[in-house]
Image (cartoon, rainbow, N blue to C red):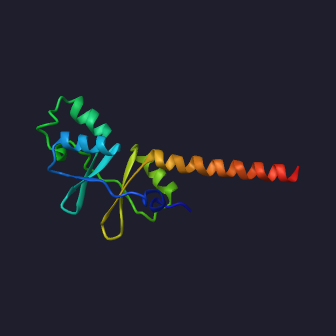
Amino acid sequence: MRTIRDIINHREPYWADSGWSVRRVVDYLCERRIGAVAIREGDRVVGVFSERDLMHRVVHSGVDPEKTMVSEVMSKGIIQVSPNEDYRVAKAKMFEKGIRHLVVIDQDGKLCGMVAMRELVQVDLDEYRDLVQKLNDQYYQSA
């Protein structure tokens, strides 16, 4: 069973402060080549800011990214997952909620990172490739 921890264990948790401007958060996303970031107040995760939020709540709404705090335009309903969760359960949660990123928070409430839908789909692809390879190996060994 692949867990969320298996997928995100190789990187540090990215986050931005709720008092940062939208412009600063967008620069942060671009520098790290990520599509979403957890927004914190102190040690507490209070929201998520994603490319979708940027398009709908900033660009489309005509909001000035220099003068607007990310806390004003972030998604506030935090949908989270445990690092010990099976990746398929997390993927189902994303499909159910219509989202592309989940915040990963451990049992102590500590931010562990975020996981993207594309990462979970990649795990599926890797598993299918492995299965096809095993079937090919079995077929050619028995022939």
- Residue at 54% x, 51% y is 123
**Looking at the image, which residue sits at the far front?**
31
For residue 1, above or below residue 131: below
Q: Residue at x 18, y 61 (%)?
A: 42
Asked whether, in this view, residue 24 is left or right of residue 50, the answer is left
Residue 135 at x, y = what percent? 75, 50
Given residues 21 and 12, the one toward you in this image is 12
Residue 24 location, quadrant: top left
Q: Which one is nearer the viewer's eye here, 75 or 3?
A: 3
Q: Is residue 130 above or below residue 84?
A: above
Residue 113 in the image, given as x and y percentages of width and height: 35, 57
Residue 87 is situated, as x and y percent measured from the top left of the image, at 50, 56
Query: Which residue: 40% across, 63% down?
Result: 82
Q: Residue furthest left?
A: 67
The residue located at (56%, 62%) in the rendering is 1
> Toward the viewer: 50 or 7?
7
Indicate whether 60 appears above or below 8.
above
